[in-house]
Image (cartoon, grey):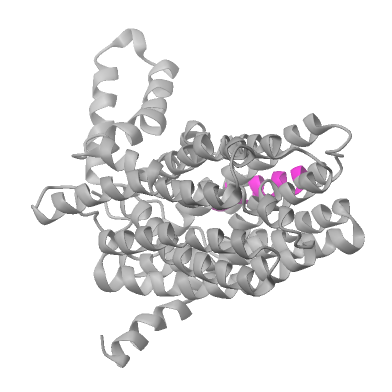
Amino acid sequence: MKASSWGQAASVYLHPRILAILFLGFSEGLPLALTGATLSVWLREGGVSKTAIGLFALVTMPYALKFLWAPFIDRLRLPVVTRLFGRRRGWALVTQAALACALIGLGSTDPIADLWWTALLAVIVAFCSASQDIVIDAFRVETLSEEQQGAGAAMLVLGYRFGMLASGAGALYLAEFFGWRTAYYAMAGLVSVGMLTILLNPEPAAATSREAEKRERHVAEWLEARPHLGGWRADLLAWLYGAVVAPFAQFMTRNAWAAILAFIACYKLGDVLAGTMASPFYVDLGFEKTEIANVTKVFGLWATIVGGLVGGVVVNRFGVLKALLLGGVMQMVSNLGFVMLAWAGHDVTALAVTVAVENVCGGIATAAFVAYLSSLCNVAYTATQYALLSSFYKLGGDLLGAPSGWLADHMDWASFFLVSMAGALPGLLILTWLIGRSRAGEPDAEPAPAGSAR
């Protein structure tokens, strides 16, 4: 690829809509560490067992179940708020305000004295965060053109990591000097970044597709032919069909839809298995909170930036499926860095190398993965279908992440991270099969451009 072509491909990152995705990605990424890695450090410092910390992965289950309420966020109008701000922007502002309040509540708990209250507030934070994700993901897919989706996915990853930096390194710094309550209150204040971005950007145009219109018109005609279902009953049933049934029915018209869902659930299993126990691993090796923050959050951010931006260019240059294969192999091999660190012990240089390799590989894989999920959505059901797809990814991570603490308790760290590599194999095998279908010219094997009406 010529230098001019690379420059032209990179220039898309300067578009105002792409830059807006950077800040919305920050808003999406901010809460994740506060119920994950940062919370794990808080728990481990208080003497909570690794098994219990591993089970805390289940508090983020709302991310895996968000497809259950996504149809209502997709179609339901909020009194006053929708009229003032629009469908997407109104829901975004409401979920962000609720998220800020939930973070204040979580920061006010004492996990050492009452772990159950901490778990409950963490679930509420995850619910509000997952609801925000539903809106922002739909806003992103609907706002960007087909040519901008690869860059948008990369910018989302970049902003996401900035958010995780704030709630990771930033929260750890604040906790070190001012305590955990102040740290969580400050994170609640940073939710305003996403709210301001929403207020400064226009509502995306409502989109539909011929297929969706035909499907919903057919249901309306069916209801009209049954007078006993007329009036408000017909209106309610038609709304429920369009909001709840149609998005899932449309997705299931794809060939190999079950294999696609299985791939989404499995693609990042190895990465999730290792990542769930990364923070307790660092603590057990004797790293201080400031060392963890400096290396894994601050230094690691720049490695992720490189990986995410390269991933966006790779998607645009070689296509989504090839980018997914490259990223999947790289993120699997990157777990060997944790094995090296387990042998090295408390060595900041070894930690930096491990984090650099893991974050570059993970950034490439994640950018390709986000672009793939976006490409599978029908424009008439963006919020619901993206929530469904990302829920399958999260569900796979939760099911494997929860027992990761038990595995770590029953083997040494080097063995644990070697085992974690096996988690990547199912996703890569399914992906190889999907690529084979694409080469054979099978329909729906190669995803359509993101936001298309397929």
Going by the image, does 386 lie left or right of 221?
right
Going by the image, does 278 lie left or right of 107?
left
Estimate the x, y position of residue 401 in percent, counting from the top left: 55, 40
- For this rendering, which residue is in front, 7 or 240? 7
Residue 201 seen from this side: yes
Q: Quadrant of residue 241?
A: top left
Estimate the x, y position of residue 123 in percent, counting from the top left: 68, 36
- Outermost top residue: 228
Q: Is residue 204 above or below residue 69?
A: below
**Residue visible at 71% across and 50% down in the picture:** 34
Q: Is residue 245 above or below residue 125?
A: above
Estimate the x, y position of residue 284 in percent, counting from the top left: 72, 53
- Outermost left residue: 440
Q: Is residue 35 above or below residue 248?
A: below
**Residue visible at 40% across and 83% down in the picture:** 11
Query: Magenta region's main secondary structure?
Result: helix
> Does the segment drawn in magenta span residue 94?
yes
**Residue visible at 32% across and 58% down in the picture:** 450
| Picture mark count | 0
- For this rendering, which residue is in front, 43 or 100? 43
Q: Is residue 245 above or below residue 92?
A: above
Estimate the x, y position of residue 141 in percent, counting from the top left: 41, 57
Q: Quadrant of residue 225?
A: top left
Going by the image, does 224 lie left or right of 28?
left
**Residue visible at 85% across and 39% down in the picture:** 109
> Does the segment drawn in magenta span residue 430?
no
Q: Quadrant of the N terminus?
A: bottom left
Tell me the magenta residue range.
88-102
